[in-house]
Image (spheres, rainbow, N blue to C red):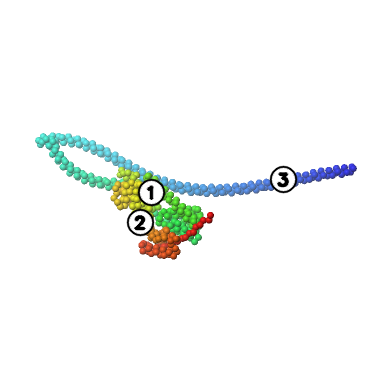
Amino acid sequence: MESTILLFIALLVFSSAAFAAGWLLSKRIGQAKVANAEKLAEKIIADARKEAEHLKKEKIFEAKDEYLRLKQTFENETKSKRSELQKLENKLNSKEINIDRRMDLLTKKEKELADLDSKLRSRQERIDKLKAEFEKLVEEENRKLEKISGISNEEAKKILMENLIEKAKREAASLVKEIKDRARQTANREAKEIIIQAIQRTAADHSTETTVSVVNLPSDEMKGRIIGREGRNIRSFETATGVEVIVDDTPEAVVLSGFDPFRREIARVALEKLVEDGRIHPARIEEVVEKTKQEMEEKIVEEGEKALFETGISGIHPELVKILGKLKFRTSYGQNVLQHSIEVSYLTGLMAASLGLDGNLAKRAGLLHDIGKAIDRYTEGTHTQIGIELAKKYGEGPIVQNAIASHHEDVEPISPISILVQAADAISGSRPGARRETLESYIKRLDHLEAVAKSFPGVDKAYAIQAGREVRVIVEHDRIDDEMSEQLAADIAEKIHSELEYPGQIKVTVIREYRAVEYAK
């Protein structure tokens, strides 16, 4: 019995010892796992900190790069603005100098007038004094004559009056002739002074228009993208704009050639947008060109409003303002017609003010005198006839209409303002460098070349390019087939040969294109 109890106690002690040993072992294993977990956590935290530090440095570098880019952009814009401000400052300085000269001239004239007025007063006083003495002498002589002659005062007065009247008539005739001669000389001199002063106050730089525009590229690699695979991009661009694209060895630039400034400006703006965007393919080209044409319509309204603001004219019909803006892209003998019209407006207004006429009406007539040139390429009649119709249609008065009609002496002027418009038009056009005959005749020749091509049925568009050495004709695909295209090219070439005079040869290219478009829905 005792042995059994001892055995039980021994088992109990052994079990307790085993339990204690197992608990201690489990505790140590748990502590080891916790330690390992803590080490792993510390390692993860350290790695995370390193990665965060790395990302922080990258973001700092990116922020610095962005800062430098923005700084460069800001400096470029600031430089451009500074250049514009410098130009404006130079222009203002020039105007200040002109104003100072004018003020000096006015001060000098005021002093001369004051001296003349003083002399006239002194002379008038002497005349009044001599007149009083003369009347006194006449009265005394009359009494003596009456006493000597034995005739009455009334009879003597009658005889004297007859003699004086006859003498006065002779002197008056002589004096009238002298006054007329002096007036002619004075009018000549004063007219010259008025014109000279008007020209001085509107002194402006002139530059003849050219037929090319240069588009700068970011790199020569862009030239290949403009040309496109097998030249499809450049052909699509030339077809959409009617302007030739010249890609030569000029570094980082291409040249746009065309005689129509409006088309050339659309092509320039569209190409700059395509280069900036980077997506250059036929569909994108057509989209950008069409959008640019819409923007140019808005721009011509802005140019018309700008011209009205510069000349201080208001109350012109909005459609007439739009037509006026089109003159920005019209040249006459190489001279920009809108700038010419603004200058004529200034000159007419200044001369009218010097003569005491309505300066605002004169400026209005001067600004609109060539309005017909905005649409004369697309409308029958001379630019004066078209201008009169536009003036009537949009409510301009008879004086403005007559100034338009008579500025080339087609009709008789009915107002001095019409004569002033004639003079201002001649002054503006005859300034050195203002016009160039060769460019105007060149443009007329290209216009005629396009007109010959468009005279054939089935022709949709025609563009004269390469300085008139080639004409590209776009036909309606449903009216002209491939075989008819060859015959059309031959017919156009034959008509050009028979109607035009030109050096060398002119290449006629007929383009027929059919497109099938469908949309997946």
**As shown in the figure, which amino acid type bears the numbered disc 2?**
Glu
Task: Quickly name the residue at label 2.
Answer: 437
**As shown in the figure, which amino acid type bears the numbered disc 1?**
Leu
Which quadrant of the structure image shows residue 490?
bottom left
Q: Of the numbered discs in the image, which one, if any, rests on residue 320?
A: 1
Q: Does residue 427 show up?
A: no
In front of the other: 161 or 400: 400
Residue 39 x %, y %: 69, 47
Measured in 3D between alpha carbons, the distance from the residue under mark 3 to the one under mark 2, in whole angstroms, is: 98 Å
Measured in 3D between alpha carbons, the distance from the residue under mark 3 to the one under mark 1, in whole angstroms, is: 90 Å
Give the vertical position of 52 relative to 450 (above or below).
above
Q: Of the numbered discs in the image, which one, if any, rests on residue 34?
A: 3
Q: Of the numbered discs in the image, which one, if any, rests on residue 278?
A: none
Residue 484 x %, y %: 43, 64
Residue 396 x %, y %: 34, 47
Disc 3 vs disc 1: Cβ atoms closer than 8 Å?
no
> Residue at 45% of width from left, 57% of height from top?
240
> Residue at 18% of width from left, 35% of height from top?
135
Q: As drawn, is 134 to the left or to the right of 449?
A: left
